Image (cartoon, helix red, strand yellow):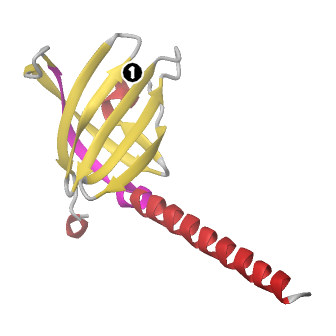
Amino acid sequence: MTRKNITNHLLITTLFILLLAATAGAQTKMQNAQNALEGKTFIIQVYDYSPDGKKTGTPMQDELTFVGGKLSSKVMSKEYIFAPGSYSVKADAEGIAFAADNINLLNDQVIFWLGTVKSDTIEGSMKWFAKGTTQLFWGTLKYKDEEK
């Protein structure tokens, strides 16, 4: 091998290692964000809202649980037969954003959850496509680590 070939080989190897390290770092950050929600349950209030964004009506209490890579709504599972659905996350300095969907086991209706977790609080929206409704939710962590 010539000196030029060795230099090119080392350069390509170095770039490959840097790319591999960057990819692994991104995967680790994503896994850490996913793990940050795993096993947590939030007590939420789900409510309708007016066009100007104000809460209306009586809120419904529910529990959102993140377990096994899936989000489950206690009320939607028990009363409307929605299965737990996979969730994805993205973490930044503001908190952990998540998105999930639940599918009704009887009629394939879909609910789409979109929200943000900041410390011990959660907020976001729930869109039930078959009903054409979007509701907002807000809540807090059910158990602190020391209370389990």
Q: Is residue 101 above or below residue 118?
A: above
What residue is shown at x 21% (from left), y 43% (from top)?
43
- Neighbor class of circle 1 (other Cα within 10 Å; few <14, some 14-19, many 20+) is few
User: Residue 47 colored magenta?
Assistant: yes
Tally the numbered discs: 1
User: Residue 108 colored magenta?
Assistant: no
State which quadrant residue 79 falls in: top left
What residue is shown at x 50% (from left), y 62% (from top)?
26
Relative image position of residue 80 (x, y in whole percent)? 39, 21
Q: Where is the N terminus found, in terms of image quarters?
A: bottom right
Relative image position of residue 144 (x, y in whole percent)? 21, 62
Q: Is residue 32 above or below residue 50?
A: below
Find disc 1 in the rendering and name its residue: 80
Left or right? Give the position of 57 relative to 66.
Answer: left
Say what amino acid the circle numbered 1 marks. Tyr
User: Is 43 or 22 nearer to us in this picture?
Assistant: 22
First to last magenta residue range = 34-48
Residue farthest along the right direction in this orientation: 1
Residue farthest along the top direction in this orientation: 131
Relative image position of residue 57 (x, y in whole percent)? 9, 17
Q: Is residue 74 above or below residue 10?
A: above
State which quadrant residue 95 falls in: bottom left
What residue is shown at x 73% (from left), y 77% (from top)?
13
Say what secondary structure mark 1 lies in: helix
